[in-house]
Amino acid sequence: MDDINLHYRFLNWRRRIREIREVRAVRYQERYKRILVDGDTLSYQGNSDEVGCYVAPRPLSKGNVYFEVTIIDTGVRGTIAVGLVPQYYKLDHQPGWLPHSVAYHADDGKLYNGNTVGQQFGPKCNRGDRIGCGIYLDVTHMGAVLHFTQLCGVVLCVVQVGSVVVPVSPDGLFPAIGMHSLGEEVRLDLQAEWGPEEDDSVMMVDSHEDEWGRLHDVRVCGMLLEYVGKGKSIMDVGLAQARYPLSTRSHYFEVEIVDAGEKCYIALGLARRDYPKNRHPGWSRGSVAYHADDGKIFHGSGVGDPFGPRCFEGDIMGCGIMFPRDYILDSEGTMQGAAWGTHLTRIHPGGQSCVCAI
């Protein structure tokens, strides 16, 4: 009798082990919908009317706190989302749209934290960029501090985009990628190391975004400004406006043309604080600017006057103000004093300079 009981106990034990293994296999299984998974490559397989979503098989943990996504192709709209979700997240919603999920969206640079309305959080992302997501537990907030990073593939720099505190569900937070338009494709690295690569060509830099008061269709990556708009019409202008005006202590700035693009539609100048975001500096009232493509000066008008040479890749354009000795800036921001002049400079790669005053 004892031998029979022992045999049944052994069979029950083997069945229990098998059930546990089956439960674990189901629990740690990747989930996806309208996403084609080919190794570490994920691509959208919907009709652009429905969201595709991928959820990794395991949550982030103490031994694996970070993952990265490389954008291979932005497709039609670049509606790619990277973030963390509960294990059984609804796969027909972008990460960040539903409660207990958070995600960074590449198409608008916004953070979605359990809401379909996002908050401006960082730069837009394009083909070749990498988006990183990592967490560390924060006892004081009784949750996890979620960090996002952007690694710009073109200029090879690492930007710490920002962080946010999120609650942690009992089952943990699972890496998730969402897509929503034809042609979108990414590469997923769930074993990525948190931090820049040990390479001389890659260095950690400050994003410098706090130096800019307004950014429209312009991406900041370290000291670089890159136009990311459509560029199809005269209204598709990108604008980067500094947070603070020039002053007697900071009266000059320079811009080096790293890449002139197709037509070098680059303008450098000064504008009022509420300048229209879709107008080149110099085109509208309260602005003056030197345009690199034609060498003309535009002073509150869409018609420019010949002023200097055209600028090309490698040239440095400078702009400064010669303040009078009795200069005063009143409480309304109006300049008081004798006549003052704005100087625009073009410095050739060879070192020669041409200074023009207006």
Image (tube, rainbow, N blue to C red):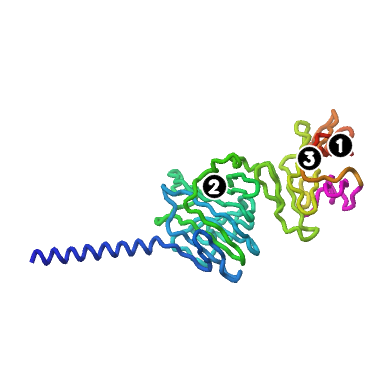
Q: CA distance from mark 2 to mark 1?
A: 45 Å
Position of 72 relative to 329 (above/below): below
* Helix, strand or loop under label 1: strand
Which sits earlier in the primary sequence, circle 1 or circle 3? 3
Horizontal arrangement in the rendering, residue 211 relative to residue 31 (left or right): right
Which sits earlier in the primary sequence, circle 3 or circle 2? 2
Q: CA distance from mark 1 to mark 3?
A: 11 Å
Which sits earlier in the primary sequence, circle 2 or circle 1? 2
**Residue tagged 3:** 316
Between disc 3 and disc 2, the foreground one is 3
Position of 277 relative to 250 (above/below): below
**Residue tagged 2:** 163
Q: Please give the range of residues in magenta.
A: 277-305
* Magenta stretch, main secondary structure class: loop
Given the image, on which type of amino acid does mark 1 rest? Cys
**Residue tagged 1:** 354
Q: Quadrant of the C terminus?
A: top right
At label 2, counting other C-alpha atoms closer than 10 Å, the crowd grade (few under 14, some 14-19, many 20 or more) is some
